């Protein structure tokens, strides 16, 4: 209990300057047993007022006061029963509260404390019913209570065992030592103690009798003191009665003073609220007139409407308490504001919509004749006309988002017609400039390349007559015209994007008013960002609301640009290559430009077109690779450079010139590798298809030609192909030399090949001459067939044959002839070595020496110069 009492005083009542008098644990009668504590407290400062407080007990939480009742409002206390110890009692304030106490003793002491507070503070205004007399008689019989308390304490003292103190134990030990002879006999020891006690009693009586006078004097003084105490108590009771009436008067004065303070405070608050309403709900007559007239014809009137609309929004956005709206004056003022707002919204929307329609119906300027430079009309004046209405657009966005979301759709529908006409006129002008003809022959110019037999025929015919074909458009013309078109369209789209973001407040988030209310209930797919790694965009995509609006305004732009790029692809066999370079450079220039907005609609559009152009370029390269792989050797061609190699060279030269200033060349490198692989495959298939042509010679010449060409161009991505070409050129030259070297000394060559095979099979070199097919006689017969003159004549025949079939433009004759000389000398030395090892001591030698062989080759070389 002490812990609970201290906790309540420390945590609940001391901070509120209250003193705890009594507590009782209770719960509400007839309900679930949820324990609370009823506390009687009183103020620690004057005027002192008593209160009844209900404190709830929640596990794991601090004490929480649920209710406070001033005891001045208590009317009746009902103890419920006079005959038995009931735990229920009622307290009646404005309504009756029914409680059940935890124990009867707590209930009794609690009601007794209420009775005392009623006498002291409430002038006995509370009625007590069904309360036992024992609960209220404490104040009437204090003497009896005191006697009962003393008796109870005495009885309690008698029933409690008291342990001896150390001094008492020492005295007992001293006494036992003094009467040590008698200690062993308890009867004698007890008799001796009784005798000593009688002696002490007689001594005490004599002392009391001798001091009788002093006792009488003491009793007299006590009687006088009791008389004085009774007089003081009577005086205190009179003072207490007087102070009770004074206390009631002071409490009444305090209550009246509190009421006066409350009246003054209420009047002050009422005046503040009236001033607040009259100040913030007032719209000047000038603002009302401006909103009523809704004159938006001049800049000054627009500014007046902007100021009036902002003032109206300020009045309508004031936070009012719910009760204020029930006031008639406030309700009438709010209705007037709403009427002004709706009328002005309708007038403004009608005015701005008419401007959109006029701009959408504007005429496109006629193209000049002749056409030297492409130019797109500027919309700066149209934007300047709408800029003064930006504050009103912002006001409409904040006040009525539903009406505001309809305006972008109306603007897009009207401006779409104007941009459609302007873009089509620009691209028609570009097509005419690109083809060098008037509009009447434009379709004929586009159909002409396709009538020549498809891309294969036009590409080969382009290679054959590229220098002399006057009707073929210049390569730089496509790049120049396409760059002009993109330079005109980029500022057009960028200016429009910046304007609509500013005019329609598209950067003010709130998910851009839920993407302009799903673009005025008409959704659309946003422009996808390029996924190809080569065109990964370093900037973020346009906001979704801006993208939807721009796609509606420029709905024809992407399809028209695709059609124009198709024209560029058709006017030149490799127009897609030029378009790829130009478009790629434009995209990267735009991404690196500070003038372009961070989220550019046009750059996203070009990213999509770039993916399309890359796909077209890859298809073109795939077609060309297929044509190269499926090409056939001309029937009259017996050697030299095959057409696929010439085609590859022309493509590389042309593409390197186009990509000379390009920012990226990843697609071109891939195309080079694909074409090189197709050319290598074509060389192998073409050389083996014609039986009249020596395969090794054709492959040697063509791979040498490719290797020499790649060495000149120094293209990094083709380094591996260059090494492969060199390797294959060397391999086929070696095969070609070995094949033709067997012809001058064919039988001798076959003989020694047999000798080497026998040695490889395990026959000893000295035993070779005993083999019947490889005896000394057989060797002499073979050597006799190749005298020096015959060898020289065979070499001259071989030289003429090589000279006949090797193409002069490759100039491989000296290289091949020198390689054959080295190989022939190596074979001669090998034959001599085999004769020395396998036919030692036979005296067999060849008819010609090394010096003769060198002179044969030297004379043949000199005669050919």
Image (cartoon, helix red, strand yellow):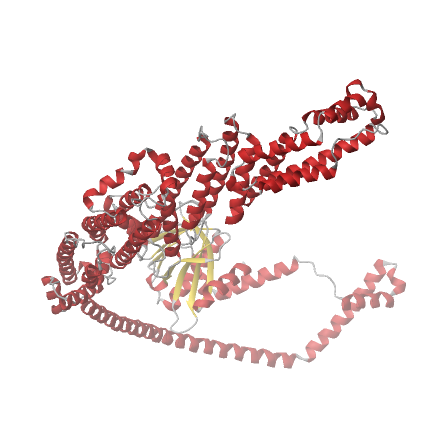
Q: Is residue 128 left or right of residue 712?
A: left
Residue most extreme to the right: 181
* Residue nearest the observer in this picture, 535 or 415: 535
* Residue nearest the observer in this picture, 393 or 845: 845
Percent position (x, y) of residue 263?
25, 71
In which quadrant of the rendered view does residue 825 lie? top right
Percent position (x, y) of residue 479?
34, 51
User: Looking at the image, is 336 positioned above or below residue 742?
Assistant: below
Can see residue 83? no
Q: Is residue 719 left or right of residue 595?
A: right
User: How many numbered marks appear?
Assistant: 0
Residue most extreme to the top: 772
Percent position (x, y) of residue 85?
46, 49
In which quadrant of the rendered view does residue 332 lie? bottom left
Quadrant of the drawing holding the N terminus? bottom right
Can see residue 276? yes
Quadrant of the drawing holding the C terminus? top right
Please report the residue visible at 25 percent of the width from the left and 62 percent of the height from the top.
Answer: 319
């Amino acid at each position: 209990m002490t812990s609970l009492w201290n906790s309540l005083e420390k945590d609940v009542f001391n901070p509120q300057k209250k003193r705890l008098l009594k507590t009782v644990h209770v719960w509400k009668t007839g309900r679930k047993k949820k324990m609370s504590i009823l506390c009687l407290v009183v103020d620690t400062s004057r005027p002192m007022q008593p209160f009844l407080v209900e404190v709830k007990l929640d596990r794991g939480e601090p004490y929480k006061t649920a209710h406070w009742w001033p005891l001045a409002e208590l009317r009746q206390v009902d103890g419920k029963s006079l005959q038995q110890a009931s735990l229920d009692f009622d307290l009646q304030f404005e309504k009756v509260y029914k409680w059940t106490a935890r124990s009867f003793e707590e209930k009794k002491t609690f009601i007794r404390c209420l009775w005392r507070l009623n006498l002291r503070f409430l002038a006995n205004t509370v009625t007590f019913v069904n309360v036992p007399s024992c609960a209220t008689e404490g104040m009437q019989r204090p003497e009896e209570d005191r006697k009962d308390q003393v008796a109870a304490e005495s009885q309690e003292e008698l029933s409690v065992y008291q342990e001896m103190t150390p001094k008492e134990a020492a005295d007992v030990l001293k006494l036992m030592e003094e009467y040590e002879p008698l200690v062993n006999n308890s009867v004698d020891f007890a008799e001796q103690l009784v005798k000593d006690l009688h002696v002490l009693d007689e001594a005490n009586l004599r002392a009391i009798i001798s001091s009788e006078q002093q006792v009488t004097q003491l009793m007299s003084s006590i009687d006088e003191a009791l008389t004085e105490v009774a007089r003081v108590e009577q005086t205190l009771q009179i003072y207490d009665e007087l102070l009770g009436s004074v206390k009631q008067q002071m409490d009444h004065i305090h209550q009246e003073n509190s009421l006066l303070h409350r009246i003054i405070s209420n009047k002050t608050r009422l005046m503040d609220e009236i001033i607040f309403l009259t100040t913030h709900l007032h719209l000047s007559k000038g603002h009302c007139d401006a909103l009523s007239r809704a004159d938006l014809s001049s800049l000054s009137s627009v500014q007046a409407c902007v100021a009036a609309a902002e003032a109206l929004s300020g009045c309508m956005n004031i936070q009012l308490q719910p009760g204020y709206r029930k006031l008639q004056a406030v309700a009438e003022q709010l209705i007037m504001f709403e009427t002004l707002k709706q009328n002005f919204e309708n007038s403004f929307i009608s005015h701005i919509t008419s401007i959109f329609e006029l701009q959408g119906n504007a005429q496109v300027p006629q193209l000049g004749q002749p056409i030297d430079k492409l130019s797109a009309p500027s919309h700066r004046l149209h934007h300047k006309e709408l800029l003064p209405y930006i504050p009103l657009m912002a006001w409409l966005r904040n006040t009525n988002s539903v009406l505001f979301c309809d305006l972008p759709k109306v603007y897009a529908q009207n401006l779409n017609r104007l941009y459609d006409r302007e873009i089509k006129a620009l691209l028609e002008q570009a097509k005419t400039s690109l083809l060098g003809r008037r509009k009447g022959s434009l379709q004929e110019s586009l159909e002409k390349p396709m009538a020549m037999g498809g891309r294969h025929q036009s590409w080969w015919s382009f290679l054959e007559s590229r220098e002399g074909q006057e009707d073929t458009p210049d390569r730089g013309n496509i790049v120049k015209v396409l760059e002009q078109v993109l330079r005109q369209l980029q500022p057009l789209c960028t200016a429009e994007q910046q304007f609509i973001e500013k005019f329609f407040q598209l950067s003010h988030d709130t998910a851009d008013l839920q993407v302009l209310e799903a673009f005025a209930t008409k959704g659309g797919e946003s422009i996808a960002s390029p996924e190809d790694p080569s065109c990964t965009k370093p900037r973020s995509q346009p906001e979704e609301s801006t993208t939807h609006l721009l796609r509606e305004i420029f709905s024809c732009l992407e399809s028209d640009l695709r059609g124009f790029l198709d024209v560029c692809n058709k006017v030149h066999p490799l127009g897609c290559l030029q378009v790829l370079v130009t478009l790629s450079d434009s995209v990267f220039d735009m991404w690196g430009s500070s003038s372009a907005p961070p989220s550019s609609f046009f750059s996203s559009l070009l990213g999509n077109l770039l993916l399309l152009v890359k796909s077209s370029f890859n298809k073109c390269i795939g077609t060309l690779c297929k044509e190269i792989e499926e090409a056939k050797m001309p029937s009259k061609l017996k050697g030299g450079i095959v057409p696929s190699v010439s085609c590859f060279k022309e493509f590389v030269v042309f593409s390197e010139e186009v990509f000379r200033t390009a920012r990226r060349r990843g697609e071109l490198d891939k195309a080079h590798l694909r074409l090189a692989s197709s050319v290598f495959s074509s060389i192998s298939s073409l050389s083996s298809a014609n039986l009249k042509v020596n395969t090794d010679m054709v492959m040697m010449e063509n791979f040498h030609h490719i290797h020499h060409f790649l060495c000149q161009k120094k293209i990094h991505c083709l380094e591996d192909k260059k090494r492969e070409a060199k390797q294959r050129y060397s391999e086929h030259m070696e095969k070609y030399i070995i094949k033709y070297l067997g012809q001058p000394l064919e039988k001798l060559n076959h003989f020694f090949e047999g000798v080497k095979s026998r040695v490889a099979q395990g026959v000893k070199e000295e035993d070779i001459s005993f083999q019947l097919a490889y005896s000394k006689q057989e060797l002499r017969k073979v050597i006799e067939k190749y005298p020096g003159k015959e060898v020289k004549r065979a070499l001259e025949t071989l030289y003429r044959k090589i000279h006949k079939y090797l193409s002069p433009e490759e100039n491989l004759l000296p290289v091949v002839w020198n390689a054959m000389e080295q190989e022939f000398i190596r074979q001669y030395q090998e034959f001599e070595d085999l004769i020395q090892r396998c036919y030692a001591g036979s005296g067999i030698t060849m008819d010609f020496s090394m010096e003769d062989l060198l002179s044969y080759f030297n004379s043949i070389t000199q005669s050919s110069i």
